[in-house]
Image: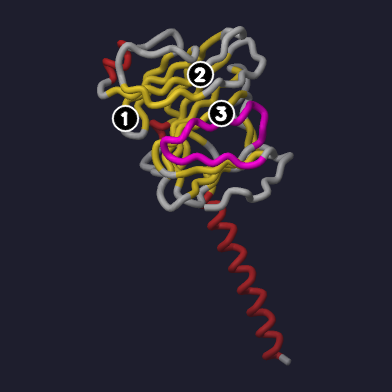
Amino acid sequence: MRFVRRRAAARVLIRVVGLASFVATSAAAQSETCGPAEQRAGREFGCFITAREDLGALPKDSALYWHIDAFTARAAAEAAQAQRSTVVRSLGRIWLFTIAERGWRPASGQRIAVVGPLPLVDADAYAAIYMEGVFKPGMHSAAHRHPGVEAWYTVEGEQCLETPEGKLEQRAGAPGVMVRGGVPMILTGTGTGVRRSLVLILQDAAKPRSVRATDWTPAGLCRP
């Protein structure tokens, strides 16, 4: 009888240890928050804020796009800036990020991508928050939402976004992916290698950048 009880206790212990291991692994795989890039303190993986640009009011009568241009020197990027441009060092390169109409181009630099049109939320003033995301396969964010559109351009690897409307997949060099403001989402690094993406959140400047989406449960559509 004691032997049976010991075996049952052992099975319970194994289950508890296994559950704890699963929880720890899941927690380690998540990127819960995005901090400033200058405070990453040697962290290689996660999401990191590279710049915030307060843009004020934006025109409502014309579509706006995220223009992504690369430069070899910061001085050249700064010389090419327009009204709503931001020079950012991210993922080992110098970038000029600009919110402008479709046909805008800088006087120099290498055109990488144009993402849009960007669906704007109703706001008196807007902020462009730029980030870089570096995820291992299987690493994922928490379920969250933003007070404005979030857009991605992946420069290496693959990613998958799940929202209540389904999933959006993106490989390096593919057209930009966007999720409208207020829509809950979860992002997962997929494929076989590290995913590196440039990120824009064009949001209501008066609201917090991100909040947890506790009212939505993902269906697990994105697989590593």
- What amino acid is at disc 2? Tyr
Residue count near mark 3 (Cα–Cα under 10 Å), binned few <14, some 14–19, many ≥20: many
Q: Secondary structure at mark 2?
A: strand
Instruction: Identify which residue is drawn at 43% across, 12% down.
Output: 104
Residue labelled with disc 2? 65
Distance from disc 1 to disc 2, alpha carbons, whole Å, reads 21 Å
| Residue 48 showing in the rendered view | no
Residue count near mark 1 (Cα–Cα under 10 Å), binned few <14, some 14–19, many ≥20: few
Q: Residue 137: x percent and y percent?
A: 47, 51
Quick check: 191 left or right of 2? left
Instruction: Identify which residue is drawn at 35% across, 27% down.
Output: 89
Instruction: Identify which residue is drawn at 46% across, 32% down.
Output: 153
Quick check: 173 left or right of 122? left
- What amino acid is at disc 1? Arg
| Residue 85 showing in the rendered view | yes
Using the image, determine if residue 180 lies above or below residue 58. Answer: below
Residue labelled with disc 3? 150
Labelled disc at residue 108: none
Q: Nearer the viewer, mark 1 or mark 2?
A: 2
Q: Residue 111: x percent and y percent?
A: 36, 22
Residue labelled with disc 1? 93
Q: Secondary structure at mark 3?
A: strand
- Number of numbered tags placed on the structure image: 3
Along the line of sight, which residue is nearer the eye, 66 or 92?
66
Q: Residue 88: x percent and y percent?
A: 37, 23
Q: Between disc 3 and disc 2, whose residue precedes?
A: 2
Start-end of magenta stretch: 166-184
Distance from disc 3 to disc 2, alpha carbons, whole Å, reads 12 Å
Along the line of sight, which residue is nearer the eye, 20 or 188?
188
Quarter assignment of residue 75:
top left
Q: Nearer the viewer, mark 3 or mark 2?
A: 2
